[in-house]
Amino acid sequence: MKLKISIITCLIFVFQITISNGQETIPSLKEKYNKFFPLGVAMGEKHLQRQDTVLVPYHFSSITAENDMKPSRTIASENKFTFERGDALVDFAKKHGLLVRGHTLVWYNQTDDWFYENDEGELLSKNELFKRMKSYIKAVLDHYRGDVYAWDVVNEAISDESDLFYREDIKWFQIGGPEYIEMAFRYAREADPDVKLFYNDYDLINPKKRDKAYKMLKELLEKGVPIDGVGMQGHWTLEDVNKENLGKAIDLFSSLGLEVQITELDISVYPYYHNMDRSTLPKEIKPYTPELASKLAEKYKEVFELLRAKKDKITGVTFWGVADNKTWLSNYVVKGRTDYPLLFDKDYNPKKAFYSIMDF
């Protein structure tokens, strides 16, 4: 047993030396991009061990809590909070001099049903829901004050359906109407005057959804709602993102005077999946062939060429995961299917896509 532990320790040490001193072999992402925008990565409890803890501070300058600051992980019951997992990530960030993005305060998903109900299990009134939301936001922002530089305040409020503007089938909207979005930002600003406040959503390269988000944000800003930026979730595929639709979206949101960040970047090698019946999606697993590696590298190259060209409008890019071995895309979209959406493979080796965004 002692021999096995020693071997594992040696392997970890060798990996650390390779990352720390092998700049010529593995250049640092954050150093390469330090004149453009900060690069971040999503982390969770599963990343606070071994290779992840070495790779992250070497390549990235900020972290986002993948799940550990979401409502269901943060609030156990009214006025009872479970900050332990989020605190562990903040401690890791402090140890390595990394910034922290908070994700997320108000979201229809990963918010437990009790949050919308009274003691009898009945839905709260609008005023009661807003009172609970205000108390919750204040408690979270007070706890992380000075440790988190930005929050995704409202996440995914816009409908994917062409004939709907907002997500109307969620309890936030059913109880609070569209006003819940405005009040979330107002409560967040009241709780912390200094933290940056973002609206965050996916598929904002889609012109229909992009234009709805633009309209909503424009109207809120005209009402004096305190919004600092928009987070464009980069859950893209090889087919759906290109320089044209990405550039137009960045320009449009920036025209409102908002910061633009790419908040959840991974590029799936499988077809588009947003708002689709997952039972109908292809179940086959694509092998990671040299041809597929080249396609992914070319797409990342295209995306980052555009992002670098828009550096004056972008204040951060965050990858949604460290390496392919722990990507959510391998299981959540189609159970058991393997995806390869990130810059590092399942063994933490930099992929062709990694070098494609470093070659400029």
Image: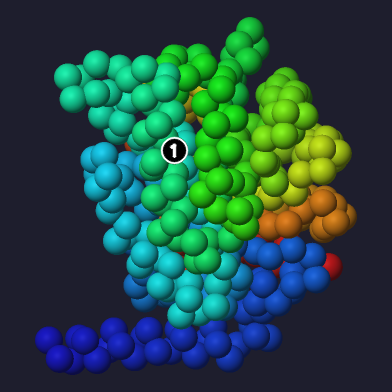
Q: Picture coordinates of residue 297 (x, y %)? A: 69, 55
Residue at 56% over, 20% down: 178
Q: Secondary structure at mark 1?
A: helix
Q: From the viewer's perspective, is 28 left or right of 278?
A: right
Residue at 24% over, 40% down: 77
**Colour scheme of the picture:** rainbow
State which quarter of the image contains the C terminus.
bottom right
Disc 1 crowd rating (10 Å Cα; few below 14, some 14-19, many 20+) is some
State which quarter of the image contains the N terminus.
bottom left
> Please, is residue 40 above or below residue 123 in the view?
below
Residue sitting at the far left? 1
Residue at 46% over, 80% down: 95
Q: From the viewer's perspective, is 354 left or right of 41?
A: right
Classify residue 91 by image quadrant.
bottom left
Can you identify the residue that label 1 sits on?
134
Classify residue 301 by image quadrant.
bottom right
Amino acid identity at mark 1: Lys
Viewer-proximal residue, 94 or 134? 134
> Please, is residue 104 above or below residue 211 in the view?
below
Is residue 295 visible to the viewer in this orientation of the structure? no
Q: From the viewer's perspective, is 26 left or right of 250?
A: left
> Please, is residue 325 above or below residue 24 in the view?
above
Viewer-proximal residue, 42 or 258? 258
Viewer-proximal residue, 65 or 276? 65
Viewer-proximal residue, 133 or 60? 133
Is residue 107 visible to the viewer in this orientation of the structure? yes
Q: Picture coordinates of residue 280 (x, y %)? A: 44, 20
Q: Picture coordinates of residue 108 (x, y %)? A: 43, 29
Q: How many marks?
A: 1
